[in-house]
Amino acid sequence: MFESAEIGHQVDKRTYDKALPAMREALLEAQYELVRTQNCQVIIIVSGIDGGGRRESVHRLNEWLDPRHVETHGMGAPSDEEQDRPPMWRFWRALPPRGKIGIFQGSWYSLPILDRVFGRARKIELEEAMTRNVQFEKMLSDEGALIIKFWFHLSKPFQESRLKALEKDPRTRWRVTERDWEHFKRYDKFRKASGLAIQLSSTAQAPWYIVEGSDPHYRELMLGKILLEALSMRLKAKHSPSHSISALPNLPKLDQQDILRSLKLDQAMEKAEYEKKLEHWQGRLNVLTRHPNFEKISVVSVFEGNDAAGKGGAIRRITAALDARSYSVIPIAAPTDEEKSRPYLWRFWRHMPRRGRFAIFDRSWYGRVLVERVEGFCTEYDWLRAYNEINDFESQLTSHNMVVLKFWLSISKDEQLARFKAREKTSFKQFKITADDWRNRERWDEYEEAVCDMLDRTSTEKVPWTLVPANNKYAARIQVLQTLCETLESALKHYKRPAKQFS
């Protein structure tokens, strides 16, 4: 794995000085072309052995490139705010938009390797982490990102001599810490763990480049030339990678039944019964938020459904029972330019709540497999891969003691028509009805098929869908509140401390 990076690669200063100006000029030209075309976002991971030149390489990149279009992130130990969310949250927040370059010194590889080296994780846990990393990077690549991963390596004797030389010189002594020597004592473990990590995560869409770090001239020219070639190849391609596939068929339809048509949409409930039950379940929800364990978890509620099914009304009955400081309602509309410049899950990751808080989504990440699928806003490949990506996303949330609930509010086509007409006649409700609502109604059958596929492929054991018959708004609101209370009560009762995120 590392043999070719321990043979003493060198570039003399004359060769370095001759090659550097042209390379820097070409890098800047490629960067400006990237900014102009918005072809993709570039993600550079800088990792490696202590003393191998990670810090210096990051400085060089910021020196060679126009810093206005570069975002540099030094990812150390997670902060308290970051520990309140799933481990990948802080990396999602830092992803650059199209046209920019994001440099990560410390990445989603750092903690799994360190945990293995220091005995906090078993080999199988490192392997599982690398599988997740590969899935994450495949998604970024499918969304158009260019991922370049550098591993700067030193042999064990050279690392020791470098640390001693730095420590001996008064000008550089500050660069060597007790942590560096502690890591050096575990060099063999680092080599073994990082070798396995690289082996498992070097893929066609995101390969590792192992560069010998003993000679700075060699290291820097390799860094620049690899980056330049990767940028040039992507820019020549003009467009982000696209995929065309023939989807496997869905289950054949031998009758007219499906999961939505099997629902009994007209649930009986009169206003007097509703008001009595509403008071009960809102009170119970409020009491649950004052449970001692509530500060150790967070709640993510997703509301999807037919247009005019009553999502907003159900959400308002939840928030009426909560302290206004403890929740956020996130209405999801068409993505902004900022959001479209990043992978589609980015805009949802950024809204994940801290512990002790609710995040309530009025429509959600399921737009990828619903409206984007039906309206042709993404390719067949994109919405097919989204099922697995969404399941993985929600699994990360639940693994971090986030309670995730998903509600589909369903009404009949006739009931929708009646509500549309009522909205048009009521002045203070007219804003709720748009031309898009009428247009979507014309594609009722296509949306129904997409919803059934979504329910089949994303209703998992840990995060199932709750189907809410909503022709009767009273019954629908009570079902939502009751489900939320019972799920939250179970989570508080069976609370388990999440695994610690180590530095």
Image (spheres, rainbow, N blue to C red):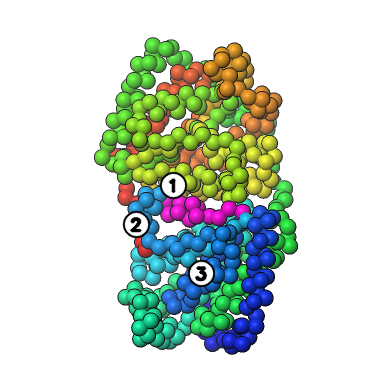
Q: CA distance from mark 1 to mark 3?
A: 32 Å
Q: Is residue 55 magenta?
A: no
- Which residues fall within the magenta stretch? 86-98
Outermost residue toward the left?
Answer: 292
Q: Earlier in the sequence, mark 1 or mark 3?
A: 3
Q: Residue at x 37, y 51 (%)?
A: 81
Q: CA distance from mark 3 to mark 2?
A: 29 Å
Q: Which residue is mark 1?
A: 397
Q: Are marks 1 and 2 in contact (CB under 8 Å)?
A: no
Where disc 2 sits, the SS reads: loop
Q: Residue at x 60, y 18 (%)?
A: 420
Q: Nearer the viewer, mark 3 or mark 2?
A: 3
Q: Residues within 10 Å of mark 1 (few under 14, many from 20)?
A: many
Tell me the amino acid under the disc marked 2. Answer: Lys
Q: Earlier in the sequence, mark 3 or mark 2?
A: 3
Name the spot of residue 288 as percent of width and height, x first: 30, 33
Circle number at residue 500: 2
Q: Is residue 121 visible?
A: no
Where disc 3 sits, the SS reads: helix
Quarter of the picture containing the N terminus is bottom right
Q: Which residue is mark 3?
A: 58
Q: Is residue 213 visible?
A: yes
181 or 30: nearer the viewer: 30
Q: Residue at x 42, y 84 (%)?
A: 162
Name the spot of residue 483 as percent of width and height, x first: 41, 30
Name the spot of residue 466 as percent of width and height, x first: 48, 32
Q: Nearer the viewer, mark 1 or mark 3?
A: 3
In the rendered image, the vertical position of residue 301 relative to residue 58, given as above or below: above
Circle number at residue 119: none
Q: Residue at x 62, y 60 (%)?
A: 146
Name the spot of residue 89 as percent of width and height, x first: 45, 51
Q: Is residue 87 magenta?
A: yes
